[in-house]
Image: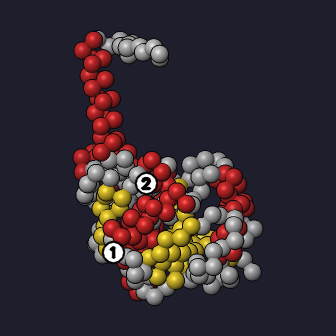
Amino acid sequence: MMATTQPRSLPFESPSESVTSLNEIALDEALDISDPLRHFRTDASDFARDDEDTVVVPSQPRSILGETIRLTFPVNSPLVSISLKVDASHGCGGIAWPAGEVLSNYIAFRGVEYLQGKKIVEVGSGTGLVGLVAGALGGTVWITDQAPLLGIMQQNVSLNNLQSCVSVRELNWGETLPSDIPLPELILAADCVYFEPAFPLLVQTLSEMAVNGSTEILFCYKKRRKADKRFFTMLKKKFSWEEVEDDPNREIYNREAISLLALTKRP
């Protein structure tokens, strides 16, 4: 039988202060359960306190029902609204991350004319957020990830009634591309640089999908570790890139170490 110990008061705390601290911890845990994404977001009170430039994308109201959230893009002038089921039990892929919101916001900013009729593949889709936005704006989209995440992606496709234009497929980086995923005109990738052993596999998959320099690739990532440099060293062998400069939110998310890049395959 495992022994249990009672939490001790923190140094210099009175008993009443200790109780207050424990109550705050319990409240934080309850809020985490009700909204797994709350640490990645800025609510209205935070927005009022902090400088606007510290926000990854401008603050927007969230509609949270259990583990379903609602996001609108572009944030400042909504064109599309997405309901998104999130589930942290699937690991990091089961929730929405800031780079995914940045990329979603950008393609929505570009509008229907940019996406209409294009064959689009999103790699490392997780919840499928970016691909769902692309489908809602007129693209024919394949959202892809590993097998454990296919279920939540399919739920999100159905939740948004996008079955006619968004397909869910398993895609393991480094493996042969499935025959039912076409060579795309546009490749979308957000927050895919996080697991070092997968770096060469991601580069390989991107290279195989991008047949030539005409394939457009939008690649959004948040710099977290020095190891990220190794990924870009590998990527440089196959691709060149430049920062996307026409995004009105660029200065804001750059300050949060997020970059949006346009990749071009080398000859």
- Is residue 195 shown to the viewer in this render? yes
Circle 2 sits in a helix, a strand or a loop, which is it? loop
Which residue lies at the image location 30% right of the left edge and 40% below the top edge?
A: 31
Q: Nearer the viewer, residue 47 or 118?
A: 118
Among the two numbered marks 2 and 1 on one chain, the one whose residue lies closer to the N terminus: 2
Circle 1 sits in a helix, a strand or a loop, which is it? loop
Q: Position of residue 144 (x, y in %)?
A: 53, 68
Label 2–label 1 contact, CB within 8 A: no
Q: Relative to 131, is 16 above or below?
A: above
Three-letter amino acid code at the position of disc 1 = Asn
Q: Nearer the viewer, residue 94 or 265?
A: 94
Q: Position of residue 5 (x, y in %)?
A: 41, 13
Which residue lies at the image location 67% right of the left edge and 56% below the top edge?
A: 198
Separation (CA) of disc 2 from disc 1? 20 Å
What residue is shown with label 2?
A: 95
Q: Position of residue 134 (x, y in %)?
A: 43, 76
Find residue 105 and report its image quarter.
bottom left
What residue is shown with label 1?
A: 161
Q: Position of residue 47 (x, y in %)?
A: 28, 50
Q: Nearer the viewer, residue 87 or 250?
A: 87
Mark 2, residues whose alpha carbon is within 10 Å: few (<14), some, or many (≥20)? many
Find residue 130 and report its image quarter.
bottom left
Three-letter amino acid code at the position of disc 2 = Ile
* Colouring rule applied to residues: secondary structure
Mark 1, residues whose alpha carbon is within 10 Å: few (<14), some, or many (≥20)? few
Which one is in front in this view, the residue at disc 2 or the one at disc 1?
Answer: 1
Residue 63 image label: none
Q: Quadrant of the C terminus?
A: bottom right
Q: Relative to 201, is 108 above or below?
A: below
